Image (cartoon, rainbow, N blue to C red):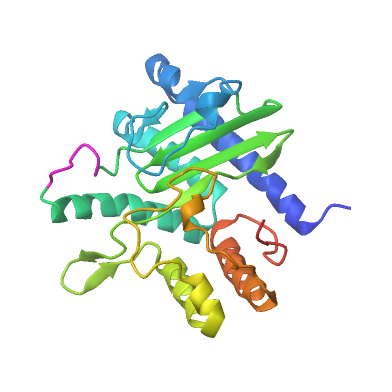
Amino acid sequence: MTTTASRTATEVAARITEAAAAWLNCLDDGQRAKASLPFDDTAERTSWAYFPRLTKGLPLLEMDARQQKLAHALVSGALRFQAYAKVVTVMASESLVNLMEGSRLDAFRDPRRYFLAVFGSPGNERWGWRFEGHHVVLNFTLSGGEIVSPTPLFIGAQPAEVPQGHSMVLRPCAAEEDAARELLGSLDGDLRRQAIISDIAPPDFVIMNSPCRVSSQRRKGCLPNRRMRCASSACDRKACRRLLWTGSSEGCSRN
């Protein structure tokens, strides 16, 4: 039986397949050589970083207005509106942060320094695409006309607040930050002591973009009980509603 969620997922897969093909078809030979990569290049296809780097793919700064529009059509077609708006806000904040920092990092704080790469041929049995730049990483893998993996996915912001004008402040990840504080605020006593592993925040993510936890940051005895599982599940459902493209968030759980 085909469910509403599965029909929607299939429609999304078809939409981004069409968008990826349209983008590739509007590139010249030199651009396509950068943008189109073999799916079997597993080392490159599974490589990702949320910090600025020169990676394979075609950057927005080497696209004309029409090509950029088609690139954004691919990105927006894979995400819910709220998630796409978050991605665009993170990208736009690069210019503002660059001004705050005195334009010392022009080469890195550039909203056009985001790379789009397609692995394989859209519509083939297996293919995928990656959109990557500072604080934004999107990876989608498709097989048989279905999305089989929407990860790794990363959307972040540093600094968390970016002043814009006299009264407006951009907080790209406001909902996630507020949800984390809400979760911490719901804990008390021993649960709160277990959850806070240090009174001083590390300079960056403890695990960076490694799939493994750093052993020194583990807290002995921090075994999730029912209340902790329910709290974390609630946060996961919030994240799913904001980021995923289809289906119910009730099935989301921690692994």
Q: Is residue 174 above or below residue 65?
A: below
Between 126 and 67, the residue placed more toward the observer is 126
Say whether residue 187 is visible. Answer: no
Where is residue 10 shown, x and y percent of the image? 71, 45
In the rendered structure, does residue 177 fall within the stretch colored magenta?
no
Q: Identify the residue at image location x=59%, y=56%.
A: 244
Q: Identify the residue at image location x=42%, y=46%.
A: 208
Q: Identify the residue at image location x=67%, y=28%.
A: 126
Q: In this view, does 238 lie to the left or right of 9?
A: left
| Secondary structure that dominates the magenta span | loop
Q: Is residue 100 left or right of residue 109?
A: left
Examine the image and state in which quarter residue 173 appears. Answer: bottom left
Where is residue 205 shown, x and y percent of the image? 40, 53
Where is residue 219 shown, x and y percent of the image? 53, 63
Q: In this view, does 66 lie to the left or right of 185?
A: left
Where is residue 239 shown, x and y percent of the image? 55, 63
Say whether residue 99 is visible. Answer: yes
Q: Residue furthest top?
A: 29
Q: In which quarter of the image is the C terminus?
A: bottom right
Q: Is residue 207 above or below residue 233?
A: above
Q: Identify the residue at image location x=46%, y=49%.
A: 207
Between 197 and 15, the residue placed more toward the observer is 197
Q: Which residue lies furthest to the bottom in this view?
A: 189
Q: Residue furthest right?
A: 1
Q: Give the range drawn in magenta.
A: 103-109
Q: In this view, does 215 lie above or below 118?
A: below
Between 30 and 210, the residue placed more toward the observer is 210
Examine the image and state in which quarter residue 233 appears. Answer: bottom right
Between 123 and 230, the residue placed more toward the observer is 230
